[in-house]
Amino acid sequence: MISYARQTQEEQPEAPHPPVEEHIAPAPRVSVQAFCETVETAAAVQSAGEDRRLGKAHLKIQMGGMAAAIEAYRSAPTPNVIVLESDGRSDLLTGLDQLATVCDAGTRVIVIGRINDVMLYRELVRRGVSDYVLAPVGAIDVVRSICNLFSAPEAKAVGRIIAVVGAKGGVGASTISHNIAWAIARDLAMDAVVADLDLAFGTAGLDYNQDPPQGIADAVFSPDRVDTAFIDRLLSKCTDHLSLLAAPATLDRVYDFGTDAFDAVFDTLRSTMPCIVLDVPHQWSGWTKRALVAADDILIVAAPDLANLRNTKNLFDLLKASRPNDRPPLYCLNQVGIPKRPEIAAAEFAKAIESQPIVSIPFEPQIFGSAANNGQMIAEISANHKSIEMFLQIAQRLTGRSETKKQKSSFLSPLIEKLRGK
């Protein structure tokens, strides 16, 4: 029989892009086979298979709809997920009953149909159909339906990965990423972890004044040992809500990695942390590209000069093409206003990128230098500095969260607390 899976009764939106705050958790390594009636649906499913959230899934598409599915599984095992398109002319319920006779236990079925009827939906649920999606569908509708099968509502939310990368070396991307993570943990009250991916020259340990004996290198070089308990032992606690997966920052070995070297680490962090901030080094390799493309949200840090403009434009174009169903990356300008340095204005930057910078952070070497040398965040050096509000603004845009309201205290608060204690 077709097993019962999570049910959703909501109609799928026709908009090609998800809402800004929507977070769809990626699907695990599963096999998906789609049987389509129309070329439009087949194209949507094909496009969904290229989405980063289905990167681990093995997708196969065939034409012929229900009849082709029944015939195919008479002599072959069924996959983890079957996507069926119904043209509305054939008897869908009768076809599902026939499919159930050749379907393996545990297989989940998604039906794409054109009949918007509550009674039909109830009958589909009674037969164990996992989801019913109204046609016409877009790629994001298919992605959402498949991924939601593996995100039970009672399960712990899958963590959001935020990747921060510099358009050029020395633009302060690491400093920005560390202060954003601080704002996420302190002001938004989200548990977060900073993963320093610059294993040779990473500065996260210095910026947070941490010197852990172990870090991310231990996980990358021992992929067979990576699990929740192992990662927890590698984390260094910075605050109540903020942890660090530090880079060794040593040159006793070379750090040449394969494309999927960090996959196990990221997957484990997703399962334990609501927010993961990746401090991505300014280099171009298979694993850095994979980390950026697979992230839920991306921030590019750029200085206002020509090389940064070119690199930001290249990154934007590549990431938008590689992530057609995600919102575009964000970018900010940093080190703005260096005396006697010719700069490209923010308006010119925005015109070339076709997107406005989220913030423009002024060049203030005194406070940023003091924070770096003392192993502190800007908020620890100066609680009212104007850049703190900028970091919070970026954190809110990247996470979709608003600032946690702090309770107002009065001069009677200590007395009230004493009375409560008694």
Image (cartoon, helix red, strand yellow):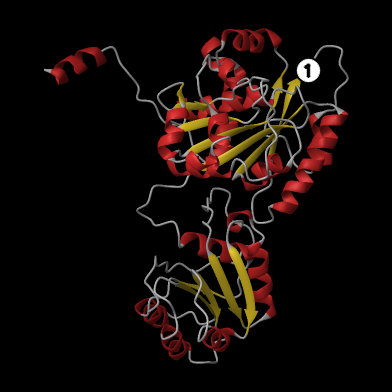
Whether residue 285 is situated above or below residue 47 in the rendered picture:
above
Q: How crowded is mark 1: few (under 14 residues within 10 Å), some or many (20 or more)?
A: some
In the figure, residue 248 lies in which quadrant? top right
Residue at 45% across, 38% down: 273
Whether residue 338 is situated above or below residue 221 in the rendered picture:
above
Q: What element carries label 1?
A: loop
* Residue 198 in sight from this viewpoint: yes
Task: Tell me if 266 is positioned left or right of 200 in this view.
Answer: left
In the figure, residue 405 lies in which quadrant? top left
Q: How many labels does the image show?
A: 1
What percent of the width, then of the height, locates residue 173? 68, 26
In the figure, residue 64 lies in which quadrant? bottom right
Q: Nearer the viewer, residue 159 or 135?
A: 159
Q: Where is the C terminus found, in terms of image quarters?
A: top left
What percent of the width, then of the height, locates residue 111? 50, 76
Q: Which of 230 and 365 is in front in this view?
A: 230
Residue at image mark 1: 337
Residue at 75% across, 53% down: 321
What percent of the width, then of the height, locates residue 89? 55, 92
Residue extending furthest left?
A: 422
Task: Tell me if 275 is positioned left or right of 139 in this view.
Answer: left
Residue at 65% across, 49% down: 327
Task: Tell me if 415 is positioned left or right of 307 in this view.
Answer: left
Q: Where is the N terminus found, in terms of image quarters?
A: bottom left
* Residue 190 in sight from this viewpoint: no
What percent of the width, then of the height, locates residue 262? 59, 40
Residue type at mark 1?
A: Gly
Residue at 62% across, 72% down: 60
